[in-house]
Amino acid sequence: MNQKRIVACLAGLLTVMVTVSASVSSRPNILWIYAEDQSPLMSCYGVQNNPTPVIDQLATDGVMFSQAFMPAPVCSATRSALITGAMPTTFGLHNHRSSRTPDSMIALPVGVKTVPEIFKEAGYFTFNVGKDDYNFQYDRKNLYDGGSSGGFANGLKGQKVDWKARKGDQPFFGQIQIQGGKSKAKIAPINRALVTIPPYYPDHPEIRKIWARHHDTARIMDRETGSIIKRLKADGLLENTIVFVFSDHGWNNGLRDKQFCYDGGLHVPLVITWYGNPDAIQAGKPRTDMVNGIDIPVTSLALAGLPIPDYMEGLNLFAPEYKRDYIIGVRDRCDFTIDRIRTVRTEDFRYVRNFMTDRPYMQSQYRDGRPYTKLLKQLYANGAMNEQQAWFFADTRPAEELYDLQTDPHQTINVAARPEYADALKAHRTILSDWIEATDDQGQYPESIAGLTATKARWKDKCVNPEYRAIP
């Protein structure tokens, strides 16, 4: 870790320790309703025939962000980023499900505290109902006063609502994890004929079935969000609770959504509502500017009146000067599949850099045995895909990709080699190269032998990438 980062971390620790003037009890509650693997398929996002009345109402009464992008297209890297307020590559938390065995633990730098630890030090009651999935070493009781590790809340049916365990009028910072796109709950299915298949997939009955189910999970998420809002209201807490509704990344059953650095993997729903102080969040005004998932923790602290540590890289979404000219996304090892992809998203373009061009996009990965994976690979082999669909299944991939979002919003036509896009390509290439250097992107360094060994112990013969040969 470079010296600048260490200094920033120590300075951040001092910042957190600053005494704030407002009394603890007067501060708002913060609640994250945190879904898994859910694309923005709610009706408030313009999706037809998929009514999501609860989230729609929260969006109407609060703020809906139409261009929210997570820092990584996989859960543990994103969750590690949001709980620290920094990109997963900043503290070496970028490899999926790392730091899970005693020999492979990753420690946060001295002075770096997680978001719940900062809230606890400020007098908040903290809880997380459901999974943590953090790629670093931590003691859960230092983060949370309540909540069960692992699993999902599923609307809190039959579970203790952890905010009831707080003392008196003590404010809370809480997270409730719901299954989102992974949910197997029952709901009246959408008419499959009414859904629009993304153009990077062939319109096959099996693909239409699983894409329609993803619309269903958006309505299940809406139903479970409604259950949580109802409990807040019944307990007299809704007015003074700032509610964040979002997902950790996009669709899990699509092969080029989750785990890949296109909008399908990184674009998520984000709605923020504060009934007690709508002016503080400029409620009723939808936001169309680009925002980063790591802005969520910083905004949470800012709205609670708490200082922001210097090591946090997110921004306060409601600061007058808020503006992002670009958003970086990262993908590294996912399960046993070793890869390194970086992306830059601007208003007009998405730039993707592939660092391991010797490996196909569809190298050995955890979804290989699923029916839709086998189907798509067979359709490719049979020549049943068009050009926009087939390139993702080829044996090689380019070092750079550039997509013109004005003409190609689904990112299917790579224009990186076209002369008329040379200036845009150079500009985005420079943004990424400068970011890698400025942040000391930890993904540029090989994963530790301990980390590879732990991965090999879990996934065994599935670990076929050459990096595993370094294990003694």
Image: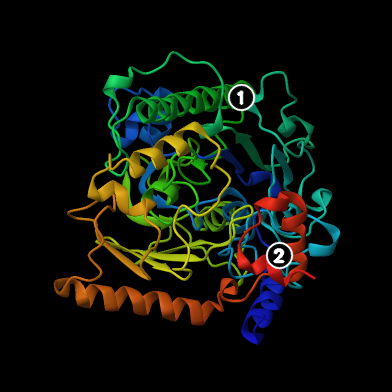
Quadrant in which the N terminus appears: bottom right
Q: In this view, does 173 lie above or below 363?
A: above
Amino acid carrying mark 1 in the image: Gly
Q: Residue at x 56, y 49 (%)?
A: 365
Report which quarter residue 398 is drawn in. bottom left
- The residue that disc 1 covers is 155
19 relative to 210 in the view: left or right: right
Where residue 146 appears, x then y in whole percent?
Answer: 78, 39
Q: Between marks 2 and 1, how big is the CA–CA gap? A: 36 Å
Task: Describe residue 160's horizontal placement relative to residue 411 as left or right.
Answer: right
Taking the image as shown, residue 78 lies to the left or right of residue 112, namely left
Verify CB contact (< 8 Å) between mark 2 and mark 1.
Answer: no
Asked which secondary structure carries label 2, the reply is: loop
Q: What residue type is labelled 2?
A: Thr
- x and y percentages locating residue 254 in the rendered image: 43, 40
> Could you tell me residue 311's position as x and y percent?
61, 71
Reading the image, the residue beneath label 2 is: 19
The answer to whether one can see residue 283 in this image is yes
In the image, residue 124 above or below residue 216: below
Seen from this angle, which residue lies furthest front? Answer: 382
| The quarter of the displayed image where residue 368 is located | top right
Q: What is the x, y in percent for residue 67?
A: 35, 50
Look at discs 2 and 1 and give the one toward the viewer: 1
| 10 Å crowding of disc 2: few (<14), some (14-19), many (20+) | few
The one of 60 and 100 positioned closer to us in this rendering: 100
Farthest bottom residue?
A: 3
